């Protein structure tokens, strides 16, 4: 953790350092419980960047392999001692208004109470749960504060404590949000993609166009401030889209995510019981009845259940992302007319979002003028706007079935959400596109 030692500071700074240290311990506890759930590649990449952050090194700073390896061993040993600990209450800086000057404590998930105490120190605290189960925490210097469409917008600058997983943007559940944007997380995403592109350049891609537009391929440090400002603007539009979805469907989204995860687990648990029984019967037939065979089969099916549930949850989140971006973000970026943010948006259009609506990339290519990137030869966004309208209609129809239909139709739709299509994406989710759609 990068905060200075409390005993060398004045009272306010010492209180902030004490709180940051407590937040970082909670971060370690969260990482101890959940870091093992990452793929090995993702884990190693995130640990590399976490090492840089913790040691105050700039993005891209050369790393000594032996030092990183030793640090990782120490961190994993620390995690082993913390996995069963409870998250600690946070010591809030003394409030002069209460007259006592004593330290009060807050639940680590009581974000409003913590931020009320940190406001005089120009610090920002964040806490939440990602993917339905993984807690994340951070405390940072407040970079900027504003409002957009009735929502508070808070930008985090230099972070003093954080978990390994650091989502770049989040929307609070209150009436005024807030929208929380983490500039360091955004900058890390940009650097990782710029670094990968430098090792294997791919001309004609959205990433290549983004790097060239902001000059990130020539001088990353000079180009990143403008990129960050634009990325924060784009992220605000996305979170506004999410907020509108919350107003429209309220807590039905949380109920849907829970129901989809439960349905996936139940379906796979039934398979686990069946597979375990088959293993035991096979062992009996061979006269080598081995309970471990049945247990192994059940364990494997149980792991599959969790993976199936996680994928169902990810599909629901991808559905929300599509609704927010097709309905709000992309129309706003097209109206703005600046090519940089659109290049950046499509540079990050991947995973389940792209898999559920791959044709959207053709609209981007038509807007930018094909492989040449000459926008004067592009269509001005005509195809992309039509695709936004078509995709929004498709995903809204699906969301209405999942969230608002009669119990029977709703349950059928949720089962289809868990079914694997020929492309690996459920047919009910996949958004098809043909030229005839543009004329509608």
Image (cartoon, grey):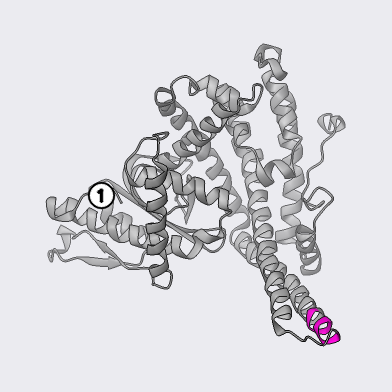
Give the image location of residue 205, x and y in percent.
65, 26
Q: For residue 29, which quarter of the picture?
A: bottom left
Answer with left or right where residue 318 lies relative to residue 284.
Answer: left
Residue 401 visible in this rendered orientation of the protein: yes
Answer with left or right where residue 121 lies relative to residue 66.
Answer: left
Give the image location of residue 150, x and y in percent.
46, 44
Q: Main secondary structure of the magenta part?
A: helix
Answer with left or right where residue 40 lies relative to residue 272.
Answer: left
The relative height of residue 88 versus residue 249 in the rendered view (above or below) is: below
Secondary structure state at the residue bearing disc 1: loop
State the residue in front, 278 or 268. Answer: 278
- Residue 43 colored in magenta in the image: no
The residue under the point 44% across, 63% down is 32
In the rendered picture of this protein, how many numbered marks are placed on residues? Answer: 1
Which quarter of the rendered picture does the C terminus lie within? top right
The residue under the point 31% across, 51% down is 1
The relative height of residue 304 versus residue 139 in the rendered view (above or below) is: below
Residue 109 visible in this rendered orientation of the protein: no
Give the image location of residue 114, x and y in percent.
32, 58
Give the image location of residue 367, x and y in percent.
69, 22
State the residue in front, 27 or 429. Answer: 27
The residue carrying mark 1 is: 3
Tell me the magenta residue range. 279-285
The relative height of residue 209 versus residue 293 in the rendered view (above or below) is: above
- Residue 284 colored in magenta in the image: yes
The residue under the point 78% across, 85% down is 288
Q: For residue 413, which quarter of the picture?
A: bottom right
State the residue in front, 8 or 323. Answer: 8
View extreme (top): residue = 376
The residue under the point 54% across, 43% down is 240
Mark 1 burial class by Cα count in 10 Å: few <14, some 14-19, many 20+: some
């Amino acid at each position: 953790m990068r905060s200075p030692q409390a005993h060398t500071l004045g009272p306010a700074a010492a209180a902030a350092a004490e709180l940051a240290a407590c937040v970082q311990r909670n971060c370690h506890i969260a990482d101890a419980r959940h870091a093992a759930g990452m793929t090995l590649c993702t884990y190693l990449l995130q640990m590399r960047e976490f090492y840089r952050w913790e040691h105050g090194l700039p993005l891209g700073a050369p790393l000594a392999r032996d030092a990183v390896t030793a640090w990782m061993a120490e961190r994993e040993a620390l995690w082993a001692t913390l996995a069963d600990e409870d998250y600690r209450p946070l010591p809030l800086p003394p409030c002069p208004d209460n007259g006592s000057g004593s330290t009060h404590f807050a639940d680590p998930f009581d974000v409003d109470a913590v931020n009320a105490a940190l406001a005089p120190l120009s610090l920002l605290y964040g806490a939440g749960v990602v993917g339905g189960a993984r807690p994340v925490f951070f405390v940072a210097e407040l970079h900027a504060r504003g409002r957009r469409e009735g929502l508070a917008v808070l930008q985090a600058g230099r972070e003093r404590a954080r978990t390994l997983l650091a989502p770049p943007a989040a929307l609070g559940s209150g009436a005024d949000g807030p929208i929380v944007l983490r500039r360091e997380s955004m900058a890390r995403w940009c650097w990782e993609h710029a670094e990968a592109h430098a090792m294997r350049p791919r001309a004609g891609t959205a990433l290549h166009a983004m790097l060239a537009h902001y000059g990130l391929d020539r001088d990353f440090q000079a180009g990143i401030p403008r990129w960050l400002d634009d990325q924060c603007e784009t992220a605000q539009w996305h979170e506004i889209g999410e907020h509108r979805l919350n107003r429209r469907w309220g807590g039905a989204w949380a109920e849907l995510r829970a129901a989809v995860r439960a349905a996936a687990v139940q379906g796979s648990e039934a398979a686990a019981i069946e597979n375990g029984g088959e293993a035991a019967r096979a062992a009996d037939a061979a006269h080598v009845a081995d309970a471990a065979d049945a247990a192994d089969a059940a364990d494997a099916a149980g792991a599959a259940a969790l993976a199936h549930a996680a994928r169902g949850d990810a599909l629901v989140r991808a559905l929300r992302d599509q609704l927010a971006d097709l309905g709000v973000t992309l129309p706003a970026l097209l109206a703005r007319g600046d090519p940089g943010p659109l290049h950046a948006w499509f540079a990050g259009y991947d995973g389940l979002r792209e898999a559920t609506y791959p044709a959207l990339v053709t609209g981007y290519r038509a807007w930018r003028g094909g492989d040449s990137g000459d926008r004067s030869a592009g269509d001005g966004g005509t195809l992309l706007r039509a695709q936004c309208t078509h995709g929004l209609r498709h995903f809204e129809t699906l969301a209405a079935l999942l969230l608002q239909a009669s119990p029977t139709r709703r349950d059928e739709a949720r089962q289809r959400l868990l079914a694997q299509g020929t492309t690996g994406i459920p047919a009910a989710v996949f958004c098809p596109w043909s030229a005839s759609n543009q004329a509608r």
